[in-house]
Image (cartoon, rainbow, N blue to C red):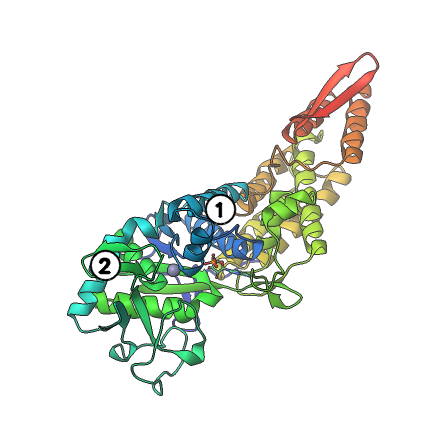
Amino acid sequence: MKLPFMPLRFYNTLTQQVQPFEPLDGPGPGTTVRMYTCGPTVYDFAHIGNFRTFVFYDLLRRWLRADGYKLDHVMNITDVDDKIIRNAVAQGKSLGEYTDIYTKAFLDDCATLRLERPERIARATEHIPQMAAAIHKLEEHGFTYRSDGSVYFRIGKFPEYGKLSHNDFSGMVSGARVDVDEYEKSDARDFALWKAPKEGEFAWDTEIGPGRPGWHIECSVMAIQYLGSTLDIHAGGIDLVFPHHENEIAQSECLTGKPFSRFWVHSEFLLVDGQKMSKSLGNFYTLRDLFGRGFTPESVRYLLASVPYRKGLNFTFDGLKSAQTAIERLRNFKFRLDSAKLPEGVNETLITQATAAVAEFRSAMDDDLNTAEALGAVFEFLRHANTALDAGEFHTGNLDSARRLLALFDSVFDVLNPTAQTGGLSEEEVEQLIAARAAAKKSRDFARADQIRKELTEKGIVLEDTKDGVRWKRKS
Ligand code: AMP
Ligand code: ZN
């Protein structure tokens, strides 16, 4: 199938349209994309609902690069907020002692899920003077007012308030204010930029007085500091559109007078029985929970990546098992390519099919990261190629194009190489592979025997050939 050329495009929450992606410095390749993504609040272990959003950031990064862009990506760590302060005080810990535990766990989990590290990770508490300076500037320009030592942003001063969440806030009550960071859309109010110290709480001494920053100002200040007044992409989970991102826009645009971000992209929720997976509902799983049940990091990654980010994704254990099965199919195919004895020559039909699959994969990903369609192209080719392999019609000349498709797939999905420690092979699977290796040796197919041994080693299984047969153990 010949596909018409369509550029990379994303659904922009700001315009409510799918638009061709064009960074401030012009289209790629070679242009650096300035991207800011809202990171975790480190008050507890992140759950896989959170990780749906972080996997989405990773896909975004990887696909921008596949399209020739360079990246300057900043992600924040919110290491001060109401919950953190409450928990740290209750445990008699300093803020840093408390948040370090969850920051480390988060970064470890990201690495386990193969999430690329942003170019910069910015902790809120390391930018307090800059936040105070920004609030001071907003005060000087009349966008704020004070009450009991706290500083509030007066949303009535920003006529475009509501342009991201597409709400008409014209009927809002002037001067009504809110101190908590998260609140309902129907409840648009002046929000706290700076919170006065409370008895027994942590506070910073700054040029605007003692206290601590509100959540929204953190992101505006760190984004502008590292990426400039106008970002190319700002991303987050869909729940951040209001109030967090709406408030970020108001503060930032009042500070700089420039549009804050060209593209706003938001990922939908991971759901459980139709409800958002969340700490408060108690319907969540952490990665540790899932690994404890024998699932691999790759199957979690694949599951979270396989549904396009703007569709809700219902989490089930069956879904996770299907992800594992899909990965096995892909790995088996790769294994066949690496080990099968192929006839010389080339199967032209299969070359055409591989080329089409690459084009379809690219065009699906360019279409607002349609990962489901991209996967469809890969599996369709796998069906053709496996049939050809079975029939002895897959030739040596077909290897390169098939491998190119797998490499493109894995540059985004990154699941083909098993994670060593949690290879997750059951005893039965290990025994089956050992039997297949013995059979290969018997038929003098030593390449295949070696390949199986290598695969087992990669999955953390060590073989020992003894005179009584093969013994195996798991690497500790
Ligand atoms: P938090 O640590 O609560 O600030 O959340 C970190 C990120 O996870 C935010 O971008 C949220 O939008 C996102 N998030 C929270 N719950 C879910 C969920 N069930 N599905 C997808 N993303 C979520
Ligand atoms: Zn943010």
Q: Looking at the picture, which amino acid does disc 2 mark?
A: Ala
Q: For the point 26% across and 68% down, which residue is it?
A: 151
Q: For the point 61% across and 32% down, which residue is it?
A: 420
What residue does disc 2 label?
132
Comparing 280 with 111, the one in front is 280
Q: What distance separates the C-alpha of mark 1 from that of mark 2?
A: 27 Å
Q: Earlier in the sequence, mark 1 or mark 2?
A: 1
Instruction: Estimate the x, y position of residue 402 in percent, counting from the top left.
Output: 61, 41
Which mark's residue is nearer the viewer, 1 or 2? Answer: 2
Give the answer, above or below, for where 173 lies relative to 377. Answer: below
State which quadrant residue 221 falls in.
Answer: bottom left
Q: Categorize mark 1 by other alpha carbons within 10 Å: few (<14), some (14-19), many (20+).
A: many
State which quadrant residue 259 falls in.
Answer: bottom left
Instruction: Estimate the x, y position of residue 182 in percent, counting from the top left.
Output: 43, 68
What residue does disc 1 label?
106
Comparing 297 with 47, the one in front is 47
Comparing 474 with 299, the one in front is 474
Q: Please indicate whether residue 348 sits to the left or right of residue 116 in the image.
A: right
Q: For the point 84% across and 14% down, which residue is it?
A: 468
Q: Please indicate whether residue 104 sits to the left or right of residue 347 in the image.
A: left
Q: Please indicate whether residue 255 sits to the left or right of residue 116 in the image.
A: left
Residue most extreme to the right = 468
Q: Looking at the picture, which amino acid does disc 1 mark?
A: Phe
Mark sitting on residue 246: none
Q: Please indicate whether residue 341 sits to the left or right of residue 353 in the image.
A: right
Q: Under tag 1, what secondary structure?
A: helix
Tell me, yes or no, if residue 83 can be seen here: yes
Give the answer, above or below, for where 306 lies relative to 112. Answer: below
Quadrant occupied by the C terminus: top right
Instruction: Estimate the x, y position of residue 283 in percent, counting from the top left.
Output: 63, 60
